[in-house]
Structures are given as structure tokens and as C-alpha cells.
Image (cartoon, grey):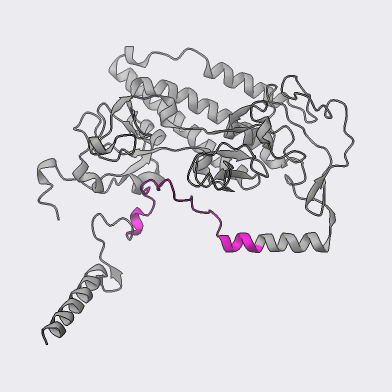
Amino acid sequence: MQRRIASEICLLKRQLCRYNQNLYFGSERIPVLGDEGDDPLYLDVPRLARTKSERKPYPTPMKLLIQRAKKDREARKAEPCRLLQDPPDNGLLVPELVHVAHQVYWSRQSLLSGLSKLVQAVPVQSCRCCFEVHIGHVGHEIRTCTGPKSGFRSATHVWRKGGVQDVIFFPKCFHLYDRVGKPRVGHDEKYSVPRIPALVELCIQAGLDLEKYPTRRRTKPVYSIEGRIVDFELVTDKDGLEGNLYSQNVDSVVDSNFGTNIEEMTKKSFFENPCNLLDQSNDDEGMNLRDLSIRTMDSWFEMMSGVKKMMEKYNVLTCGYCPEVQVGPKGHKVRMCKASKHQSRNGLHAWQEATIDDLVGPNYVWHVRDLNGPALNNNLKRYYGKTPAMVELCVQAGAPVPDQYRSMMRLDVVPPERDEVDLVA
């Protein structure tokens, strides 16, 4: 009898717990403070970093990828030899993206130039043991360090002065001379093929011409014979060189005057001596900082919008377990992966479709309302918002808060004081 009563009590407790978790007022659920996973206003707040053994989520569902593979297989069986019509799969450029490639390249140079000046006026802190970054005079006290011996420090960060490379991250990839004829880089070619920022490689494949990194421009589309790319275009002597293609200048088919002019303009604006904003008066310094931050943020949004357009046409791949990125139809075969389960892959990367965050690392940071205020408290971290480090740096320098980051920064949440932590439910 007592066991029966105890079991009924446990069942009632479980039902009461489920009822408390699913409180409804009318037809709407009552939002609970700190429950960001269910509140639609905070769905864009970045989650915690995934574990090392966890694979990155697929941008496209696996079921849809399988359906596409079946359609491609049926198309190859129905027509073994076919002329590829759609660029850039046929080796030709997408005409409407050539100008976008030049624009993105210029925006990246302008962004780096502006960040190099902003980090001199707005302090940037980076952890010595992990990749955590903080914008402010004093590093935060939130215990999220995952570096070596972080358990002995109770996951407390060890702060030092940061730079531009901590605010934004551009991963590198192998440069492809012929993205269609030779889309893969072998393991023996890892030292002979140069590595450049993946964003620059994407611009080059989309139509940007740089003398230092030549690439082949086709004038006729290629054929696909049973899934293999075959090029019947007449190969000239300069395109048929099989030696070191990167040690000499190879003229491209497409006129590149526009690209070289933009390159000269960006080099001139990037390497010019930055003005010393700290030596000016407070009013003049605030005005210059504000204008510089607004221009830098405009370059950021212009670059990101152009990258999204190019990624819709040009393939960008990333490893499912490490930050490696490769721009092109296929991933390289260099055995350099040291992430989880790399022994079973013999050091090869587990390639999958990349997102824009894989190509341009935003590096999310905690939003600080007052740079001169106290450090962020670990007990109040559920009241703080996050934002990309570049956006946070520009906002602290005087730029207005972008509308798409307002909910992520939690500007509508008033965090309690340190002595009010115990009074908050």
C-alpha cells in the first residue's frame, strides 16, 4: 500500500513538473527570463561552442543531399556525354558576379584598414589560453575558458592585449590555378601550392585578377563524360605549362585592368600612415572615431552581402571537425586534419558544405553597455547579449547599433546589479 502511494506521488510530481515547463497564458507561452532556447526573440543568440567530437551541422539537410545525388546519377546515365551549360560548373565566369568579386575584395581591404585604426582607440582583450575575445578596458569575469589547465583556474580567462587578427578571422585555403581541370590539391603538393585567405580565393575564382596568383580563364564550356570533366578547348603553350605555375606571370584571357586598378587603390589606402586619433582633442577624436566606425561597419555589411551572393554560385567546403576551408568544386587531399576521428580518415578532412561563418570568422563577444563600468559578472551572464567582435568594436567607437543585431545584444534587458543577484528569481 505504501509503495503504491509513493508511486502515485512520484507520478503527480512528474506531471506537475511538465505542467510548469509548459505554462500557457491563453494561446501564448509565458516566456521565462533566461530561457533563450524557447523565446523567439533570442533565437539568434549564439550557442556555446560545440564539443571537439561533435560534427558541424549540415546547412542543407542530408535527405535533400541524397535526392540531389540520385538526380545527378540518373542524369549521367541518361546522357553520359553532355555539355555543361550553367556557369561556373562549366569553367566560365558568372557575369553578374565579376563586379561583386571586385567589390568584396575592396571592402575587405577597407575593413582591415579601418580595424587597424579602431583597435588603437578602443581596447581589445584576448585570452592567452583560448580564442575568447572581449572589447573593453578590463576583461570579463565569465568563466568560459576551455584552454589548457582551465580547470585549475575554474575556467577563468587570462587576458592580454589583442589586435585585428582577434577581432575578425579569415581562414586560408589552397589557391587553384584551374578550378575545373584540376580541382583537387594532392598531399605531395601541399608545399608547392600557395595558401591565401579563402575570401580572396573566392574573389579570384569569381573574376578578380591578381598578378601574384594567376588563374586560368576559359572561353568555352567543358564537357562531362560519365561524371568526369573533359576540356576540348585548344590549350596554348602558356596554359599547358605543367611546371611551377605560381613562379611566373600567366596572362589571363579576361581583361584585368579593372582588377589591377582596384588592387592599386586598396594597397594605397591600406598602407597609408593612419592618423593618430589618440593625440587629438576629445570632441575631434569622437567625431573622427564615429565616422571611421560607420565607414568600417558599412564595409563589413557590403563584404558580407557580396560573399553571400558568391557562395550561392561558387562552392565553398569546410571540414566537419576543424576550421579548414577550401574554395572549389572539391576539397583537397592534404592529410593535415588533427581533429576528432582523424585516425579513421587517415588525416583527411571530412568535407561538407560551408557557411558564411566558416569563410569569415565573426568571433562572437559579450556586449558591454559601458566601457568604463565594472567587469561583466559570471552570475549575471544570462542577462548579457552577444554580437560579432567587429560590430561590438564599431558600436563602442560610436557607430549606431544595426537593427539585425539588436535582439542578439539584448538591449531590451536590464541586467541587475551585483548585490541584486540573490533577489532575482
**Secondary structure predominantly adopted by residues drawn in magenta:** loop
Q: Looking at the figure, which quarter contains the N terminus?
A: bottom left
Location of residue 311 in the rendering, given as x and y in whole percent from the top left corner:
60, 44
Residue 331 picture quarter: top right
Residue 123 visible here: no
Image position, residue 61 (x, y; %)? 55, 60
- Answer above or below: position of 153 versus 36: above
Reply above or below: 313 against 156.
Answer: below
Residue drawn at x 18%, y 74% as measured from the top left: 13
Task: Specify whether 377 is left or right of 367.
Answer: left
Q: Nearer the viewer, residue 240 or 382?
A: 240
Compared with residue 355, is residue 265 higher up or lower down, i.e. above or below? above
- Give the mark count: 0
In magenta segment, residue 84: no
Quarter occupied by residue 265: top right
Quarter of the rendering occupied by the C terminus: bottom left
Q: Is residue 49 magenta?
A: yes
Of all residues, the one furthest to the bottom in this rendering is 1
Tell me what residue is drawn at x 88 percent, y 39 percent.
233
- Is 399 on the left or on the right of 5, as rendered? right
Counting from the top left corner in percent of width and height, residue 361 is at 47, 37
Residue located at (33% from left, 39% from top): 146
Residue 365, x across and y down, in percent = 35, 38
The residue under the point 47% across, 32% down is 169
Span shown in magenta: 39-67
Asked if one can make out residue 407 in the rendered structure from this viewpoint, the answer is yes
**Which image quadrant is residue 402 in?**
top left
